[in-house]
Amino acid sequence: MALKFELVTPEKLVRSDEVHMVVVPGVEGDFGVMEGHAPFMTTLKDGAIEIFNAAGGEPERIAVSGGFAEVGDNGLTVLAEKAEA
């Protein structure tokens, strides 16, 4: 099973993909999201999102600043003020 992941800024859709896991820099600490995660919403702290395409693989990192993350039935959506690969 794969997690539907979207990273969006006010300017554009940065990433939309099915991935194994994403680690997000939340204000209360970093958290990992995989398929089937419980619904959850938090604000982001400045940091890097780590995107794992496969179990045990090296993550792709995208720097983000500000915004929100929401885990729901449709997967993980990150709405960031800025994102830089």
Image (spheres, rainbow, N blue to C red):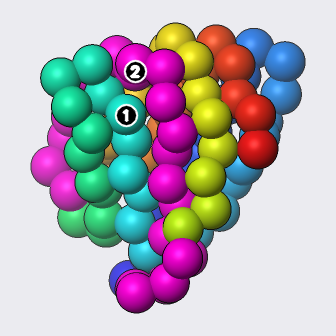
The image quadrant where one finds the C terminus is: top right
Residue 4: x, y in percent? 50, 60
Three-letter amino acid code at the position of disc 2? Leu
Residue 28: x, y in percent? 18, 23
Q: Quarter of the image holding residue 31?
A: top left
Which residue is rendered at x = 23% and y = 64% of the image? 36
The circle drawn on residue 44 is 2
68 left or right, relative to 5: left
Which residue is rendered at x = 54% and y = 67% of the image? 59
Where is 10 relative to 33, above or below? Answer: above
Where is 17 relative to 75, above or below? Answer: below
Q: How many angstroms separate mark 1 from mark 2 (CA)?
A: 6 Å
Q: Secondary structure at mark 1?
A: strand
Q: Quarter of the image holding residue 43?
A: top left
Does the magenta portion include 41? yes
Q: Are marks 1 and 2 in contact (CB under 8 Å)?
A: yes
Decide if residue 41 is in sight here: no
Three-letter amino acid code at the position of disc 1? Pro
Which residue is rendered at x = 57% and y = 18% of the image? 65
The image quadrant where one finds the N terminus is: bottom left
Residue 57: x, y in percent? 50, 84
Magenta span covers which residues? Answer: 37-58
Which residue is identified by label 1?
Answer: 25
Decide if residue 60 is in sight here: yes
